[in-house]
Amino acid sequence: MQLTVEWLRQRLVVCQPRAAVREAPAPPGAPIAAAVLVPIVARPSGLTVLLTQRTAHLRDHAGQVSFPGGRCESADASPVATALRESHEEVGILSAQVEVLASLPDYFTGTGFRITPVVGLVTPPLNLQLDDFEVAEVFEPPLEFLLDPANYQQHPIEWQGAAHHYWAVPWQGRFIWGATAGMLVNLRQCLFAQD
């Protein structure tokens, strides 16, 4: 199948909202609101997804692959505003370059975050400027690869005395897993729900 910008827009317009996803039991207390941008880059060679490799010294999720994003701040008007602000701060994507297409179901993590994934179409050139405190590097797997269920694995994990599982997708020596892979699975389910 040829994935095009128009196909992506059409699929996300009719994507039905679904219930939030919880990857593990919630820790005590209210979840911390956060948002990420799922940046789909419209390259001449095809659609890609921009992902970040977090720096090794961070307190939360050090060294992991993630979408650009972070905690919602009181000045943010919405999760979309948070995702766009954080993407600009972390990797230099300008909000004027992003066409917001949809928000996926909130994703609750076992570490106490409620993440709103905001899918946005990003128009190059990107002229990225990485926040070297938070982001070690960025990379762009093809969207077609990330939408292929054959590329995903489920791994068992025991957490707080209970058996759970997490999604993972290896790509060119990298390991995309946990919440990031889970949100990619949700994106795939949303895009192909009508099939």
Image (cartoon, rainbow, N blue to C red):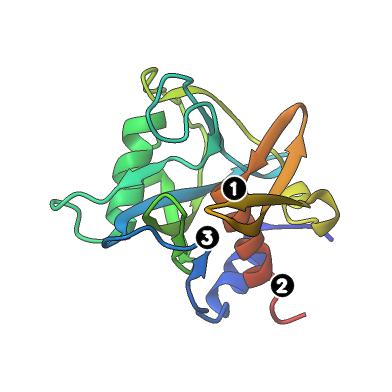
Three-letter code, disc 2 = Phe
- Secondary structure of the residue carrying tag 1 is helix
Q: Name the residue under label 3.
A: 24
Q: Mark 1 points at which residue?
A: 178
Tag 3: Cα neighbours inside 10 Å, few (<14), some, or many (≥20)? some
Tag 2: Cα neighbours inside 10 Å, few (<14), some, or many (≥20)? few
Is 95 drawn above or below residue 165 in the view shown?
A: above
Q: Which mark is residue 192?
A: 2
Q: Distance between the residues labelled 1 and 3?
A: 11 Å
Q: Nearer the viewer, mark 1 or mark 2?
A: 1
x, y (%) of residue 156? 72, 52
- Secondary structure of the residue carrying tag 2 is loop
Name, please, the residue furthest toward the left. Answer: 75
Q: In which quarter of the image is the C terminus?
A: bottom right
Q: In this view, does 151 lie to the left or right of 31?
A: right
x, y (%) of residue 193? 69, 78
Q: How far apart are marks 1 and 2 (CA)?
A: 21 Å
Residue closest to the eye, 185 or 30: 30
x, y (%) of residue 62? 47, 28
Three-letter code, disc 1 = Gly
Q: In this view, does 12 lie to the left or right of 75?
A: right
Mark 1–mark 3 CB contact (< 8 Å): no
x, y (%) of residue 172? 77, 29
